[in-house]
Amino acid sequence: MTVPRATLLMGLTLKNEPAGMSELGESLGMSPRNMTVLVDGLESEGLVRRVSHHQDRRIKLVELTEAGRQVAEQEIGPSHLAAAALFDDFTPEERGELLRLLEKVADSLRARGIELPSRDQR
């Protein structure tokens, strides 16, 4: 399970209704083409499905299938909780410093032409 696949599945668990491909792509910092490939793969595995927008059939939305929800909750969810628990021992000040340093690394990567989601896309 790749990070983008896991992130998309977990993100869809938080949605009460299907989400637009462009909205999902922006939140992952992915191009429309890469988003299509990602959704194609998840759809072929039966984890998500595309549905048409109720007002504009040209717009494709993505929603979790029951199998996708089970994978997200049973396989990905616990690892996300375990990863988050790694930071429980950090003080609030240490977490702030870590975030500041990670943002500095991200800025450095962007300056070198590496695409990352912008701060306002998170």
Image (spheres, rainbow, N blue to C red):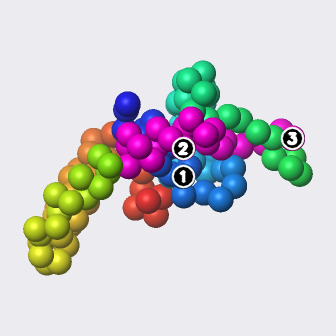
Work out whether mark 1 precedes mark 3 in sequence or the reverse, and give the earlier one. 1
The residue that mark 3 highlights is 57
Q: Which mark is residue 69?
A: 2
Judge the density around disc 3: few (<14), some (14-19), many (≥20) Cα neighbours within 10 Å.
few
Mark-to-mark CA distance, 2 and 1: 7 Å
Asked whether the residues under the numbered discs 2 and 1 touch, taking CB atoms below 8 Å apart as contact, a structural biologist would say yes
Q: Amino acid at mark 3?
A: Arg
Q: Amino acid at mark 1?
A: Thr
Q: Which mark is residue 105?
A: none
Residue 118 falls in which quadrant of the image? bottom left
Residue located at (89% from left, 51% from top): 55
Work out whether mark 3 precedes mark 2 in sequence or the reverse, and give the earlier one. 3
Relative to 39, is 122 on the left or the right? left
* Of labels 3 and 2, the one closer to you: 2
Q: Secondary structure at mark 2?
A: helix
Q: Magenta residues, as a range?
A: 57-77
Q: Tell me, yes or no, if residue 7 can be seen here.
A: no
* Of labels 1 and 3, the one closer to you: 1
Q: Tell me, yes or no, if residue 85 can be seen here.
A: yes
Q: Secondary structure at mark 3?
A: loop
Relative to 87, is 9 on the left or the right? right
Query: Which quarter of the image is occupied by the N terminus?
Result: top left
The residue that mark 1 highlights is 13
Residue located at (24% from left, 52% from top): 83
